[in-house]
Structures are given as C-alpha cells and as structure tokens.
C-alpha cells in the first residue's frame, strides 16, 4: 500500500472578482488602477505558504457552480476557457488553463456515493469554470501549475434546509478526507466564501474607487468580527455552534456549504487560525484565513 495522504492546510478564500481585477494579472482582460490591497496582500501570504508546502493538489468547493441535483465532481483532465463574471463582466474576463487530478476526483466520487450522497462525475470537456473557482485559485496560485479538484455547490443548505444541508456538506467533507488519504495526496483545501454578504447595488463610475468601499452595516461587521475572533483564538467548537445564527443574521455566504465541507474534512481543529486580512468588497465582509494543519504535527512535514 502507498503512503497515506493528508490535508496540509485549509483556507477560507473569498472570490470577489474585484481581487483579480485589482491585481491586473496577464490572464485577465480588464485593467484597473489597483484596489482592495489588504485582501490581495493577505493572499500573497497564502501564495508563499503554498510555494513552501508544495501540495500535490488544490481542492476547491466551487461556490458559484450551482448544481440542482447532487454534488458534481469535476473529472475533466484539462480545462481551458474564459471565465466571465456574469454581474461584473467589466471586471473579470479571465483566461484559464488547468489540469484536474482525476484520480482523486473519482475517489471522492466513490467515497461520497458509498456514503449515500447524490454525486455525479462532470465529464463535459467544454465545461466552463465558475468565477468563484477561478478567482480563488488565481489568488492562491496564479501559476496554475498544481492540479485541482473542483466540487460543485449543490447549495444543499439552501435547497434542503440549513441543518440537513450542513449535514450533507459535512458528509462530503469526510468523504473528501478519506479519498485524499487513500490516494496518498498532500492536499490543500479552499472554501471559496465571503462572510457577511449584504452588499451595495450601485457601482461607482470607477469600480476601484476605494472612497466608496465600506462595510454594508455595523451589525454584519460585528458578526464578522465575532466569528473571526473565535477563529483567531482557536475556539472552533464555539464558532461552529454560532455559524447557523451567523448565516441567518449576516446573510453569510458560507451558507453555500464549502466552509462546512472544508472544516469537517479537517476535523474542525481546535487550533488558532491565521487571519491574514479582512476587508469589504462592495460592502460584503471578506477574510483570508488559514489553518495550517502541519502545526498540529510533532515534526513539520
Ligand atoms: O461572488 C461575489 C461575492 N461573494 C462577494 C462580493 C462581490 C462579488 O461577488
Ligand atoms: Fe460569491
């Protein structure tokens, strides 16, 4: 039997297209004057950690790849295309070229199916990646030289009621962990989510005019800080207990399931998370946060 795989780290890795737009990478067509630096610099720390960890694979729960029947796992070996953000096409028209870790993707499919989840292999070679997947992966690893696995957002917490949906996402997390272990992969997970999610509906003439960028309301700011404070202190069980109320009261995007998937796969570690940065994008609360599981091990991997 080969070496058992492991999850090296997990990141809360939000996906506003504004972050890619502000960076002006060659893959994106629109140009900007910059903007949202605090979040972009936070992602620079993630990039450095990934360069150091050298994982075999990056797994992302694809928040804006919404599937109605079941959880779909991307099993296409290579995907090339242009991802256009439907609401902000003037900010994100991104050219991507990515390989998929098909063996791991198929292992997750099998594990999830054996747990009774409705799952499907996505094999359409012309499939287009959603912008959340593209933005999160670009911000984490703009070279696109590490294979990925992307998992659709069945959004079961929306479709099936919050508690039933969360239970399903957690089952998917356990299945993902077993598949990583069985295939021997050294994996990094990403939950592509904003925290509080109420936002403005008018864009300034210059989208990156930071004079206009501020949190939508004080109550959702206080909620974000409460959750981030618990993450920083490593009070993970207490954070988990509050998440349903947070989702209801701050319209938190983590309702879409990826955060529950990732944290369950990592065993909800009672460790201090590394909050790398927090700021607003069109009024929503976005944090880049890391859980470096290598710190739980006696010797660094
Ligand atoms: O998808 C998003 C988001 N979650 C937050 C802010 C802005 C745009 O897109
Ligand atoms: Fe989103």
Image (cartoon, rainbow, N blue to C red):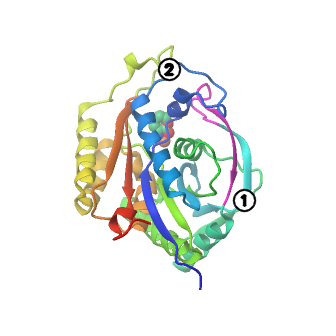
166 relative to 98 in the view: left or right:
left
Tell me if residue 213 can be seen.
yes
Quarter the C terminus occupies:
bottom left
The residue located at (43%, 59%) in the rendering is 9
Disc 2 crowd, CA 10 A, few/some/many (<14, 14-19, 20+): many
Label 2 SS: loop
Asked whether mark 1 lies closer than 8 Å to ligand 2, one says no
Quarter the N terminus occupies:
bottom right
226 relative to 221, above or below: below
Expressed as whole percent of the image width and height from the top left, the position of residue 276 reads 36, 43
| Residue placed most toward the observer, 234 or 262 | 234
Mark 2 sits on what residue? 207
The quarter holding residue 99 reads: bottom right
The residue located at (26%, 48%) in the rendering is 227
137 relative to 82, above or below: below
Q: Is residue 36 magenta?
A: no
Label 1 SS: loop
Q: Which residues are magenta?
A: 84-100
172 relative to 241 in the view: left or right:
right
The residue located at (66%, 34%) in the rendering is 27
Expressed as whole percent of the image width and height from the top left, the position of residue 100 reads 67, 59
Disc 1 crowd, CA 10 A, few/some/many (<14, 14-19, 20+): many
The residue located at (32%, 46%) in the rendering is 275
Tell me the distance, in whole angstroms, between the alpha carbons under discs 2 and 1: 35 Å
In the image, farthest residue toward the bottom: 1
Tell me if residue 199 can be seen.
no
Cβ–Cβ under 8 Å for marks 2 and 1: no
Mark 1 sits on what residue? 76
């Amino acid at each position: 039997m080969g070496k058992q795989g492991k999850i090296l780290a997990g990141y809360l890795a939000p996906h506003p297209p504004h972050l890619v737009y502000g960076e002006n990478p060659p893959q994106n067509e629109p140009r900007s004057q910059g903007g949202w630096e605090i979040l972009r610099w936070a992602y620079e720390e993630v990039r450095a950690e990934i360069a150091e960890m050298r994982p075999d694979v990056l797994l992302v729960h694809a928040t804006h790849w919404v599937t109605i029947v079941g959880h779909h796992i991307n099993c296409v070996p290579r995907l090339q295309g242009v991802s256009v953000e439907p609401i902000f096409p003037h900010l994100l028209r991104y050219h991507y070229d990515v390989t998929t870790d098909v063996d791991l993707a198929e292992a997750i499919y099998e594990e999830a199916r054996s747990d009774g989840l409705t799952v499907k292999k996505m094999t359409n070679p012309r499939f287009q990646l959603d912008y959340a997947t593209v933005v999160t992966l670009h911000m984490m690893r703009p070279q696109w030289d590490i294979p990925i696995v992307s998992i659709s957002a069945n959004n079961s917490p929306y479709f099936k009621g919050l508690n039933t949906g969360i239970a399903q996402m957690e089952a998917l997390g356990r299945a993902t962990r077993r598949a990583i272990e069985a295939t021997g992969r050294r994996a990094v997970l990403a939950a592509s989510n904003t925290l509080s999610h109420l936002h403005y509906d008018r864009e300034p003439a210059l989208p990156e005019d930071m004079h206009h960028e501020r949190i939508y309301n004080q109550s959702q700011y206080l909620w974000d800080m409460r959750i981030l404070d618990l993450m920083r202190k490593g009070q993970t069980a207490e954070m988990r207990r509050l998440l349903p109320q947070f989702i209801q009261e701050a319209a938190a995007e983590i309702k879409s399931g990826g955060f529950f998937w990732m944290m369950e796969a990592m065993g909800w570690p009672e460790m201090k998370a590394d909050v790398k940065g927090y700021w607003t994008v069109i009024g929503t609360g976005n944090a880049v946060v890391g859980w470096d599981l290598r710190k739980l091990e006696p010797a660094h991997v």
